[in-house]
Amino acid sequence: MKHVRGPLCSIDLGDRTVETESIDDELESFIGGRALGTKLAHDRIPFDADPLGSENRLYLATGPLQHATMSFTGRMSATGLSPLTDGLLSSNAGGFLSRNFTATGYSAVEIAGESDELVIVHVTDEGVEFEAVPELEGAKTSETCAYIEDEHGLGDDHTVTIGPAGENEVRFASIMTSRERAFGRGGLGAVLGSKNVKAITFDGDSTREVEIPPLQMDVHREAAQSDHIMRRQGTSSMTEFANTVEALPTRYFSELSFEGAEGISGDRVEEKKYKKGTCSACAFACKLPTRDEESGLETEGPEYETVMAFGSNSGVDDIVDVMQSNKRCDELGLDTISCGDVVAAYLASEDEFGNVELIHETVEKIARREGIGDTLAEGVDRFHDELDVENWSVKGLEFPAHDGRTLNGQGLAFATSNRGADHMYAEFYSLEYPLVDESKAVSKNGLEGKPPKVVEKENENVIKDSAVLCKFSRDFVSPDRLSTLLDADYEDLLAVGGRVVALERHFNNQRGFDRADDRLPYELPDFEDALDEYYAERGWDDDGTVPDSRFEDAGGVPADD
């Protein structure tokens, strides 16, 4: 099985010490990316750690496919204990960082401890340096990137950074890279903020050898020749389609379609697109550099989830207003999905849907924890009673689009996801719209026969997040191709995925998570029976916990499903 190569670089911020250690066993068993980060986090973060305390650790990792020249491989993974969900969580981001990360020669970087002053950590193949940067306190993403380029000659493709939201420990703060790409979900930006890390840079010339099969060139060529609509409109192409099938959350989830969808549609985004945008090595080029000529606003996106959160869910029907919200979140370091939903909840409590000035003002207050922003910065799960609004979250994570009340299998997948309400954990919506070949599609109605497929999709996505491979590769990288690229039987890869899901679940079980947390704010037909079937398929107990018997040894490697 192909896997990323190189040692773990473990950085202790409190002691200012750096250790390099071999993790060959973990690499051979867990590929890289999310799987590797999950294994390390499960074994090295105390089960009772405070997500915003010094005992939490953050893991950054690439996978073997970051050594390819293939499209869909410009991504990497981040893993840690989430301040938003209070559970183990991985997030991944695109952009141009991953190849500079691999150039350091490390398979993964661990950030531990807590600095007593605001610092930038510089990681190279020659060592690690710490730079005190008190002058960057409160700096926005672009300001920090400009400082690093001016002082160190490193572009934003070498950098991860946090904005004011991360410094102020907003529970859904993101880690930004390439200025406008985000490790968005779950608040890992607040983890760096709690450790007093403003940015981390990566540079070197020590990329390890990983031989990738020639199939990579076929995938790359097909991506370059594709006429897929996402090459023009990104995921915003979903907006009117989801609206038509009544899967577009509107006015803080009180409705399933939006009368103003045309004004925030993929067509409107495409009209604002002024050049092509992509990630490292990718010819698919689905990114969305956009500009509003009248205001001079430039941003990247918005993608569909942002269109939902700051558009339909907030009662806004002008794409430029959504672009403004998107830009603010990128600069301040905020997850656009959670932030948009939080703002929508506040608008619901104030009966102010569509108030764009209030929306933008509130985003700024959240990032700086000023006034009502201090309450909203805690996330919907923690403030919903105070604002007297419904708790639209699962395990503390706010909902994306692809509404489960219409796409019932996606609803089940929201509930079972160890990350909480995350559409990319199983990506089940793709089967129910459907966005796949008709032979793979399933009815959006009901849950019959869907739990085993949710398990398979969750396991497969672990492998994609570990390879690391963009989810938009689904039309180009079949299971057979994935097996060829990683030199492993597809069933063996799914087994690795199942072990990683079990590690996440086991860690969360130790923190008190069980069946009671696999819940939705709405009812689905035969939901309890489907949950029973899901647990049985995974070999878990009917209370949603992983039995100790599933762990083969003291190292905590769970047996296959």
Image: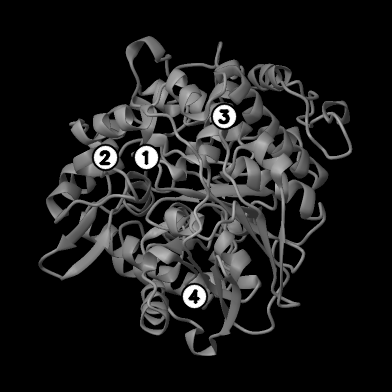
- Mark nearest the camera among 3 and 1 is 1
Report if the CB atoms under discs 1 and 2 are less than 8 Å apart.
Answer: yes
* Secondary element type, mark 1: loop
Q: Is residue 54 above or below residue 39?
A: below
Q: Image quarter for residue 459? A: top right
Q: Residues within 10 Å of mark 3 (few under 14, many from 20)?
A: many
Q: Which circle marks residue 72 in the picture?
A: 1
**Dot 2 alpha-carbon crowd within 10 angstroms: few under 14, some 14 to 19, many 20 or more:** many
Disc 1 or 2, which lies upstream in sequence?
A: 1
Label 4 belongs to which residue?
Answer: 164
Q: Earlier in the sequence, mark 2 or mark 4?
A: 4
Of residue 517 and residue 62, the one placed in the foreground of this image is 62
User: Where is 558 relative to 69, above or below?
Assistant: above
Which residue occupies the foreground of this view, 134 or 209?
209
Q: Image height check: is 339 above or below 417?
A: below
Residue 556 shown left or right of residue 499 in the figure: right
Whole-Å distance between the Cαs marked 3 and 4? 33 Å
Question: Quarter holding the N terminus?
Answer: top right
Tell me the element at label 3.
helix
Q: Which residue is mark 2?
A: 284
Which amino acid type is shown beneath numbered disc 1?
Phe
Q: Residues within 10 Å of mark 4 (few under 14, many from 20)?
A: many
| Mark nearer the viewer, 3 or 4 | 3
Percent across and percent down for residue 60 are: 58, 55
C-alpha distance separating marks 1 and 4 = 31 Å
Residue 313 visible, this angle:
yes
Residue position for label 3: 458
Three-letter residue code for mark 4: Pro
- Where residue 369 appears, x then y in whole percent? 54, 75
